[in-house]
Every structure is written in C-alpha cells, then in structure tokens.
Image (tube, rainbow, N blue to C red):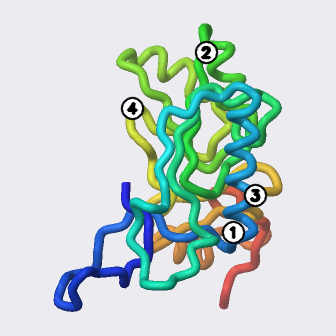
Amino acid sequence: MRTGHPLAVEHPEDALPALDFGPLINAAKAKELGDQVVEAIDRGAVPLHRATLADGRFLPGQDTSAYLPPVTLLNPPPSSPLFHAEPFGPVDTIVLVDTEAELLAAMNASNGALVATLSTDDPDTYDRLAPHIRAFKVGRGKPRSRGDREELFGGFGASWHGAFVGGELLVRAVTEGPAGERAPGNFPAYQLIP
C-alpha cells in the first residue's frame, strides 16, 4: 500500500503515482488515531501489519504530520474505539468470534454503519444474518460501495441526517416524491421543488 503526496514523482515526465492513502484531515486527527492504535496494542491487540512513513512518497521537506501509515490489528479490546467506531483513517481491525450471536454483536458494536460486508459461502447464512446487521447497505462476500451513484447512500442514527443519492435517484427524490413525506433512504421530510 502506498501512502504519500500525489505530486511526489521521481521524474517530472512520470505520471502521477498511484496512491492508496493520503493525509488525514489534519495532524491532530492523525495523532489521535495513532494514539488509539498504540493504546489498543498496549491493551492486547496484535499488530498484523504496520507500515511506516519511510515507505511513503512525499515532496522534499513536506510536513507529514497529518499522515498515518496503514496498520491492521487483530482483536482490539472491546473498550477501544477501534473496536466500536469507524477510525476515519488507514486502520483495519479483525475481530475473532465463535458464534453467529458474537458475530452480530461485533458487527453492530457501533450501533450503525454506512456499509458492511458479510462473507460466507452459504446463501442461507447470509439471508438469515444480513437483516440483523445495522448497516445502511450490506454486501455479500465483497465490499459495497459507499459512492455508487445509482444506489442510495446513508446511515443510521445521528451519524447521517439524510441519505445521499446521485444521478437519477437524486432527481427522483427531490422532484417526484409526495410533498411532506420521507424520501428514499433516511432523508427528512421535504417539499417538492416547483
């Protein structure tokens, strides 16, 4: 996985480098998430992968304080924010479970997600468990897109006040729905545009 600045090329004639990760929103967020990683490891999480910024592509003299190298942790403790909240950075966690009930409890620890994936070879298992996963969209065996312009996109609870839609769905949601009723997804009530 490549981390860095999109203009950090070795030769000016080179194409822009393909990057997997850029900076977080600011240096404070990178430090906060980095501290959560260290705390989770100190409390028993097993680091399966830890990249370094030395492997990244940066401009000469560039401030890299808003960057966090990718990390994957096995079994962060349940009290860690990395167990129950989206990290908004290049941190993946793997939680081991023994039963379907534990699986659903772990998947629903945050009380709602934008997207989730349930990987199973058995369609009946997917059909039985997927409705119990608190996510706006659930994929079977592969990640679902958050930004597919032909699908609704939203969340649960206060994390998102309204679904995001694109293309034809956006036009339909704003112009064809009955006035005062909820649009598809979790849009609040709206008025038709004349």
Q: Give the foreground label among 2 and 4.
A: 2
Residue 155 visible in image? yes
Asked if the residues shown at circle 2 and circle 3 are in contact, with their CB atoms under 8 angstroms apart, the answer is no
Give the residue displayed 68% in from the left and 30% down from the top.
Answer: 76
Q: How many marks?
A: 4
User: Residue 78, image x and y in percent?
Assistant: 77, 28
**Residue 178 image label:** 1
Residue extending farthest left: 13
Marked residue nearer the N-terminal end (2 or 3) = 3
Asked if the residues shown at circle 1 and circle 4 are in contact, with their CB atoms under 8 angstroms apart, the answer is no
Mark 2 and mark 4: span between their CA atoms? 18 Å
Residue bearing the label numbered 4: 141
**Residue 113 image label:** none
User: Residue 52, image x and y in percent?
Assistant: 48, 54
Q: Give the foreground label among 2 and 3.
A: 3
Marked residue nearer the N-terminal end (1 or 4) = 4
User: Residue 136, image x and y in percent?
Assistant: 62, 46
Q: Is residue 12 left or right of residue 176?
A: left
Asked if the residues shown at circle 4 and circle 3 are in contact, with their CB atoms under 8 angstroms apart, the answer is no
Q: Is residue 117 above or below residue 14?
A: above
Residue 111 visible in image? no
Mark 2 and mark 1: span between their CA atoms? 45 Å
Residue bearing the label numbered 3: 32
Q: Amino acid at mark 3?
A: Glu
